[in-house]
Image: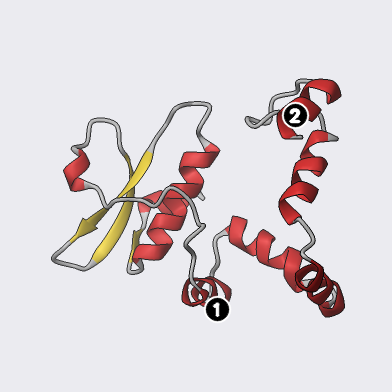
Amino acid sequence: MESELTKSHPSLQRAIDIALWMNFKYRIDERSYGVIQDKKAHWYNVVETQGRRKSSLVELPNDYRGMTYEQIEAIRTIVNPLSHWEEMIGLFSSTHGEILRFILANGVPLEKLIRYELAIRGYDQNNLWVGFDRARKIWL
């Protein structure tokens, strides 16, 4: 993923996806990434934000809650997807269709399943070992 920082990206969404992932990945180090636009070339670059004026950065969304089907389609059809998207898509792509339909039809709480899975691993939000009891308090 770090190699993506040295590249220019024709897609604003891809640059945003990289910046959001890098901000999550380096949250413990308190490193922050943003996107700048080369208006002449219509390219976007992901950069560390330290020492940069906020006005020079593209505003990043806080999360993906507003993601559209068009954005999902772009992620699914890109030739060289970002590794975190590839893994997430793989979870659903390899799941039998009847299971996916069951999840939707019955409102299976995916967030709770994920939280439970994280709790039984014994790590906190920053992937630091805190033990099983503490992890349960954090995630559940």
Image coords of residue 73 (percent x, y): 53, 77
According to the picture, the residue beneath numbered tag 1 turns out to be 77
Q: Nearer the viewer, residue 74 or 62?
A: 62
Q: Quadrant of residue 138?
A: top right
State left or right for residue 3 relative to residue 137: left
According to the picture, the residue beneath numbered tag 2 turns out to be 123
Question: In this rendering, is residue 128 above or below 80?
Answer: above
Image coords of residue 99 (percent x, y): 85, 72
Q: Label 2 sits on what residue type?
A: Tyr
Image coords of residue 15 (percent x, y): 38, 58
Q: Which is more N-terminal, label 2 or label 1? A: 1
Question: In this rendering, is residue 6 above or below 125?
Answer: below
State left or right for residue 51 relative to residue 91: left
Quadrant in which the C terminus appears: top right
Q: Nearer the viewer, residue 44 or 107?
A: 107
Q: Nearer the viewer, residue 6 or 82?
A: 82
Crowdedness near tag 2: few (<14), some (14–19) or many (≥20) residues, C-alpha within 10 Å: many
Secondary element type, mark 1 = helix
Which-is-in-front pick, marks 1 and 2? 2
